[in-house]
Image: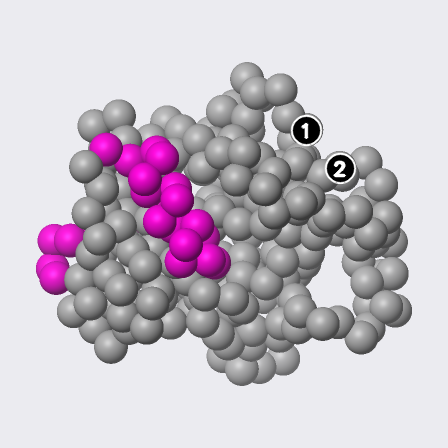
């Protein structure tokens, strides 16, 4: 048990899927895990452990933004022995070829700042996904009738962004989408020698202004969860 995770030792699996929304963790556990048990509800940040195809899996909400994710990822790794952490979440598309419901597999994650920023001082550390997870996720995704994109994303520390000039540069340099957590997850995985990947469903688009209605998001997110699970145990 830690400050933010009320699970007991042994309750958390070595493989953890991390949606930002705790209710998405509940939905994923109920729909994709067998014998899922609630192992954490501190501060309403729900976590469940069950099995998928005979493999133990924990699905733990991380909250919104890199500071929140950093808390949960640190405790999962340091106190509960998590070895593989996969973010499953939504993102905003930035390139014209990226469409709603497409899935982005984040090879790298650019950021302006993160909780780990001060550690590196003058160095611009480049956090990246684990290659074995990325490769397995690409293979898992290719069998599905959805658009798949592999490349760079941008992890922003602000939701209500007032820097259109910065977004323009992200688009100019080929950034596929924007979200708020992956860069810190990749940095922590590098620090603790764990595996990490972000599998992201495009729920809206910064260029076109399109957005998925809430009633269509669950159906689209199913592919993302299955890709993450297949990649984790490939």
Residue 219, located in which quarter of the rendered image? top right
Within 10 Å of disc 1 (Cα), the crowding (few <14, some 14-19, many 20+) is some
- Residue 53 at what x, y percent from top left? 26, 25
Give me the C-alpha separation between circle 1 and circle 2: 8 Å
Q: Is mark 2 on a helix, strand or loop?
A: loop
* Magenta segment boundaries in residue numbering: 8-34
Within 10 Å of disc 2 (Cα), the crowding (few <14, some 14-19, many 20+) is many
Instruction: Look at the numbered discs 1 and 2 and tell me whether their residues touch, using CB distance below 8 Å.
Output: yes
161 vs 110, nearest the viewer: 161
Residue positioned 27% across, 42% down in the render? 57
In the displayed structure, would residue 174 be above or below residue 98?
Answer: below
In the displayed structure, would residue 146 be above or below residue 47?
Answer: above
Residue positioned 35% across, 64% down in the render? 45
Q: Is mark 1 on a helix, strand or loop?
A: loop
Mark count: 2
105 vs 101, nearest the viewer: 101
- In the picture provided, is 80 more to the left or to the right than 193? left
193 vs 63, nearest the viewer: 63
- Residue 214 at what x, y percent from top left? 61, 47
Q: Does the rendering let one see residue 195?
A: no
- Residue 32 at what x, y percent from top left? 34, 34
Is 31 one of the magenta-colored residues?
Answer: yes
Where does label 2 land, which residue?
99
Where does label 1 land, which residue?
147
């Amino acid at each position: 048990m830690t400050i933010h995770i009320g699970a007991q030792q042994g309750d958390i699996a070595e493989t953890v899927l991390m949606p930002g929304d705790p209710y998405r963790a509940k939905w994923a556990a109920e729909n994709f895990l067998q014998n899922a048990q609630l192992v954490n509800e501190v501060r309403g940040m729900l976590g469940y452990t069950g099995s998928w195809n005979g493999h133990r899996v924990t699905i733990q909400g991380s909250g919104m933004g890199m500071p929140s994710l950093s808390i949960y990822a640190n405790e999962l790794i340091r106190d509960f022995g998590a070895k593989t952490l996969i973010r499953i979440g939504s993102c905003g598309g930035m390139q014209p070829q990226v469409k709603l419901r497409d899935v982005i597999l984040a090879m790298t994650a650019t950021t302006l700042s993160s909780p780990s920023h001060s550690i590196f001082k003058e160095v611009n550390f480049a956090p990246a996904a684990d290659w074995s997870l990325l490769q397995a996720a690409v293979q898992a995704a290719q069998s599905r009738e959805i658009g798949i994109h592999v490349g760079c994303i941008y992890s922003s520390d602000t939701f209500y962004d007032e820097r259109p000039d910065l977004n323009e540069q992200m688009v100019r340099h080929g950034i596929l989408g924007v979200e708020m957590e992956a860069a810190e997850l990749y940095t922590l995985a590098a620090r603790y020698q764990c595996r990490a990947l972000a599998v992201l469903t495009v729920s809206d688009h910064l260029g076109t202004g399109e957005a998925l209605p809430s009633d269509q998001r669950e159906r689209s997110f199913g592919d993302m969860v299955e890709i993450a699970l297949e990649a984790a145990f490939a």
